[in-house]
């Protein structure tokens, strides 16, 4: 699932909680979800972990996933 779908399927309160768990603000995640900003590698890892892998790093970085995380196999 892409971040935009995941994020906007959360309630407004849950978006805030999700952002805090990811170590960022709701507004920044909203910008990332809309594609206005690229997530850092650290934020991508946090999004993947806190979404229960509903949103994966590979989905956020399809073009250079292997360069960013060479230790992980691309599915």
Image (cartoon, helix red, strand yellow):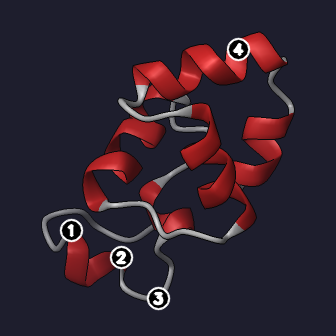
Classify 10 Å Cα crowding around label 4: few (below 14), some (14-19), many (20 and above): some
User: What SS does tag 1 mark?
Assistant: loop
In the rendering, at what x and y percent does residue 8 appear? 84, 37
CA gap between label 2 and label 3 equals 6 Å
Classify 10 Å Cα crowding around label 1: few (below 14), some (14-19), many (20 and above): few
CA gap between label 1 and label 2 equals 6 Å
Q: Which of marks 4 and 2 is in front?
A: 4
Q: What residue would you read off at disc 4?
A: 14
User: Mark 1 near mark 2, Cβ–Cβ under 8 Å?
Assistant: yes
User: Mark 2 near mark 3, Cβ–Cβ under 8 Å?
Assistant: yes
CA gap between label 3 and label 1 equals 12 Å
For this view, does 46 lie left or right of residue 20? left
- Residue 13, quarter of the rendered image: top right
Q: Residue at x 55, y 30 (%)?
A: 51
CA gap between label 4 and label 1 equals 29 Å
Q: In the drawing, what numbered circle is on residue 63?
A: 3
User: What SS does tag 4 mark?
Assistant: helix
For this view, does 67 lie left or right of residue 50? left
Q: Residue at x 76, y 52 (%)?
A: 4
In the rendering, at what x and y percent does residue 17 appear? 57, 14
CA gap between label 4 and label 3 equals 30 Å
Label 4 or label 1, whichever comes before in sequence order: 4
Label 3 or label 1, whichever comes before in sequence order: 3
Q: What residue would you read off at disc 1?
A: 69
Q: What residue would you read off at disc 2?
A: 65
Q: Which residue is drawn at 67% across and 70% down?
A: 35
For this view, does 15 lie left or right of residue 40? right
């Amino acid at each position: 699932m892409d971040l935009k779908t995941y994020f906007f399927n959360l309630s407004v309160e849950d978006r805030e909680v999700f952002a805090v768990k990811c170590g960022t603000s709701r507004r920044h995640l909203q910008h990332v979800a809309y594609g206005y900003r690229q997530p850092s590698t650290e934020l991508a890892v946090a999004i993947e972990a806190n979404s229960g892998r509903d949103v994966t790093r590979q989905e956020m970085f399809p073009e250079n996933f292997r360069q960013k995380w060479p230790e992980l196999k691309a599915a």
